[in-house]
Amino acid sequence: MKFLVKSIKTAGVSLEDVEIAVGRLAIEEEWEPMGPTPMPKIETLRSWDMKLLKRYRPFYMPICDLCCLCTYGKCDLTGGKRGSCGLTIDAQQARIVMVACAIGAATHASHARELVELLIERYGEDWPIDMGGEIHVEMPNTRLVVGIKPKTLGDLAFALNYVEEQIVQTLAASHTGQESDYLDFESKALHLGMLDHVAMEIADVAQVITFGFPKGDPDAPLAEIGLGCVDVTKPLILCIGHNVTNSIDIIDFIEKSGLGAPGEMIEVAGLCCTAHDIVRYNKAAKVVGPISYQLKFVRSGAADVIVTDEQCIHTSILHEAQKVKAPVISVSNKALRGLEEVSDKPVDEIVDMLVTGKVPGVAILDLEKAAAVAVLTALRIAPIRKKFKVVPDKEELAKVASKCVKCGSCRRNCPIDLPIDEAVSAAKNGDLSKLAEIHDLCLGCARCESACPRGIPILSLITGAADYKIKTSKFKMRVGRGPILDTEIREVGSPIVLGEIPGVIAFVGCANYPAGGREVAIMAEELLKRRYIVVASGCAAMSIAEYRTEEGTTLYEEYSGAFEAGGLVNVGSCVANAHISGACIKIANIFARRRLRANYEEIADYVLNRVGACGIAWGAMSQKAASIATGFNRLGVPVIVGPQGAKYRRLYLGRKEDIESFTVYDARTGDKVWVGPAPEHLIYAAENKEEAMVMAAKLCLRPNDTTKGRMIKLTHYVELYKKFYGTLPPDLHLFIRTEADIPITHKFEILEYLKKVDWKPWERPVVDPTLLERLIRVKK
């Protein structure tokens, strides 16, 4: 806040026209000239969005062609019909996508707010943002969007004020009788995606600077991961969710109570992103695995106490925990689960309530008290619960399966069409092998059980049949290192932009895989061998760990953790995705010297045309995944989703036959030049891992590639296409500008192909590409 005082006169002071600023100094510091778009509103970057949407037109796949959001409905929107409010089906699909992005952005912003406020309470608002000696451009998303250089926790709270205000303003557009144009809904979705990356960055930086997480360490330690990595003979606390604060309080309480480190006398394990952040704090904790393991692990009875915080927690968790007599402690007001809130009760009384089974669980919003209750309850209840940790034998499993009539309801309701009916039927006769084979592919959603007319606990059968596999499932995962170092950006900036490093591939998102998490690791290994920089986060980073190479090691053990060609970088949990977008931004700022502060359009234009990066969200499931991907899209980074990702209803697809849409300005001359379909799409759904790998190589092509860089990138595109499809890519001629672009190892074959399609060398093979007219240096 600023106000002007015309005159101040005291006995010793006389001042006139004094401007007084109230607020945080970081906001006013001139660390760089202010760019054109500080704290952009809905309309501020709309022109940039429309440039993207003109090239990458939304392609809608309605999974519902009705609108039921107001009392005029249901409204049938098929066949060009309008709803009672006047909305068309394309606008309705775009509205639903926008709402999904709003949910995702709000979830991360809420997570960030809760973290920042708690950490300010514990450490003070002046706690410094210190990301270590090799990171000077900290928080690039916040600098780019908000236009401030945060220095303290208090500054993060200020930046969140902007994010929260914009989420509310944008979500309001979804109300009946507000926005009506599908492209404007898409622009708002892109706006929300951008806000999400700021919120994620704030959340992760806040926990990195206060909890002592790695600060971009390429040699971050290896931690244990897998269903079999915990010692079930010891009391076990299972933490599920995304907000790690209470899990850290649990570890601290264990150590302060003289119980040693996690794993010595009491096990602390995590599921989903809380697991990532637990081992960033203390590598002695254990990572059970991604979201798909929740019900499987809970039903195993291994957990003595289950602590839930927020996000991606199976909403039947209380019901499932009751089956194995494991008490549940909820520590988030976003998911109280109908439990009594007992923060005002003494610790001993709460422990007695849980151990005696008086209540199935409690809600405790005092996190330090919740930690004490979790540890003391686990110690007391573990001996009582031993019988629930015993897996049924083969005969018992066959008896349960004997009720199966092979009606096929389970398979018809399986999201990925697993042959569950055949496996259960085989188990009736004592053959558990087919159920065990399904285990690694199973999403753990339990939809098959809801559909079973005989009430067979199918997921429990699958888990029991795979008992040996589960007990021996132990792997190593490099803990989340957080941001990319400025020094690493300086080393790789030039080869990425010029194309000599073929690309940066980010495996992100959830575990809704079409054929198991192993596919993510197989894709990562193929690309690592080809010297791509591979970055990972969230459930995808865990799935990469649960795979062994021919040498018997995990990919994290075999490959460097540095941001370099052939490096495998685990940045951490969902909120650490901001460090991936941040790396793209830092390439433009550190390597290319583009101004960062509030300069979104120019940086996004640079990334789209020069930075060969692509995301693969192979198991994307949540609204958060939708907003994360859409935030990457606004920045100019394409994303590939798996076949389940088509259910998000919308893709951003380029039309390579549309010459005009892939025409850019040459910033040197102002001429309009066709640069080929590079990158061809912004969001693309691949049917299988082979198509995803081929498309990832193609989506790393950029107009700015040098001839050497284009040759390297096309080498991988051609080799992958030939490996999986047995022929040259049918669109190869669209990416070859001169003969110098042709991969040497396939030159003669490609020259023959080029003759057949009547290819001609481009008149302007190398340009300085931009979509922004204001960046043209010579005006005609």
Image: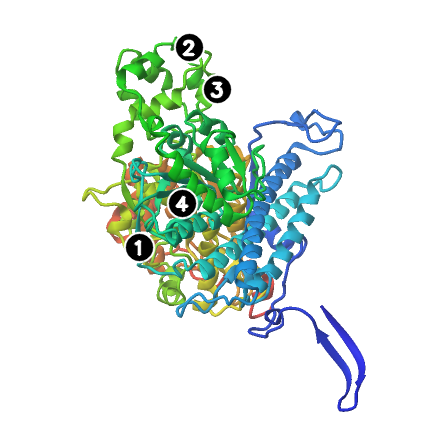
Q: Name the residue tied to disc 4.
A: 275
As measured in the structure, the alpha-carbon distance from the residue carrying label 4 to the one carrying label 3 is 28 Å
Residue 461, by quadrant, is top left
Q: Name the residue tied to disc 3.
A: 450
- Mark sitting earlier along the chain (1/2): 1
- Local packing at callout 1 (Cα closer than 10 Å; few below 14, some 14-19, many 20+) is some
At label 3, the amino acid type is Ser
* Residue 339 in picture, x, y percent from top left: 57, 34
- Mark sitting earlier along the chain (1/4): 1
* Residue 191 in picture, x, y percent from top left: 61, 50
* Helix, strand or loop under label 1: loop
- Mark sitting earlier along the chain (3/1): 1
* Residue 253 in picture, x, y percent from top left: 42, 50
Query: Which of the colour schemes (rainbow, by chain, secondary structure, one colour) is used?
Result: rainbow
Up-down relation of residue 253 to residue 601 (above or below): above
Tell me the mark number nearer the camera, choosing from 2 and 4. 4
**Residue 729 shows in the view:** no
- Local packing at callout 3 (Cα closer than 10 Å; few below 14, some 14-19, many 20+) is some
Tell me the mark number nearer the camera, choosing from 4 and 3. 4
As measured in the structure, the alpha-carbon distance from the residue carrying label 2 to the one carrying label 4 is 38 Å
At x 48%, y 34%, the residue is: 354
| Residue at the limit of the structure toward the bottom, as seen here | 12
Tell me the mark number nearer the camera, choosing from 1 and 2. 1
User: Which mark is on residue 221?
Assistant: 1
Q: Relative to the observer, which residue lies in front, 607 or 352?
A: 352
- Mark sitting earlier along the chain (2/3): 2
Q: Name the residue tied to disc 2.
A: 407
* Helix, strand or loop under label 2: loop
Up-down relation of residue 603 to residue 440 (above or below): below
At label 1, the amino acid type is Pro
Marks 1,2: beta carbons within 8 A: no
